[in-house]
Amino acid sequence: MATDPMEINCEGGKIKISHDIVLTIARHIAAEAKGIVSISGGLPGGIGEVFSKNTTKKKGVKVQKEASQIVVNLSLVIKYGFKIPEIVEDVQEKVKASIESMTEIQVSKVNVYVQDIVTD
């Protein structure tokens, strides 16, 4: 798991932001989206990613550091009856915008994996 904080260079010096902060922002924003039941575990990925020091995971969210940008992977459970492409696009846009505006860390991609659909 990545333990080094992400650094942002600014006029007054460097800002270090913990990977957990980015994970928390992504989880919170995704959970607020209409039609999302939960953020689930079980993201796809190879064994190499499990031991990569550029990857951080937390139940249903994975962040990979790539040079000066990050890739966010979300694993979601959606409520039956909602249009999956619309929900996914909304989550992608909001997660990317929120992380970038709150941290000034550039997000290159937000990948969404729909793990399940539930009826209530």
Image (cartoon, grey):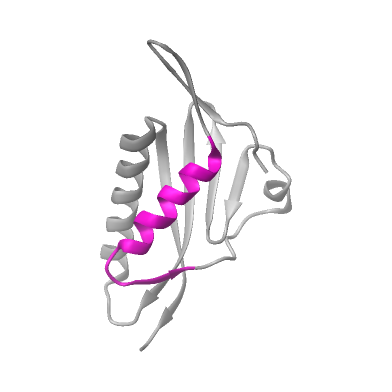
Q: Can you say which quadrant of the picture contains the N terminus?
A: top right
Residue 111 visible in the displayed image:
no
Q: Position of residue 92 (x, y in %)?
A: 34, 52
Say above or below: 115 vs 89. below
Toward the viewer: 80 or 23? Answer: 23
Report whether residue 118 is seen: yes
Q: Quadrant of the C terminus?
A: bottom left
Residue 80 painted magenta: no
Residue at 39% from the left image edge and 56% from the top image edge: 28
Q: Nearer the viewer, residue 45 or 31?
A: 31
Residue closer to the observer: 65 or 13? 13
Residue 7 pos. (x, y %):
51, 24
Residue 68 at x, y percent in the picture: 49, 26
- Magenta segment includes 28: yes
- State whether residue 104 is above or below residue 79: above
The residue lying furthest to the bottom in this view is 120
Against 38, residue 11 (above or below) is above
Q: Residue at x 31, y 36 (%)?
A: 101
Image coords of residue 80 (percent x, y): 33, 82
Identify the image quadrant of residue 84. bottom left
The residue depicted at 29 percent of the width and 64 percent of the height is: 87
Magenta span: 18-39
Total count of labels: 0
Drawn side of residue 91 relative to residue 54, left or right: left
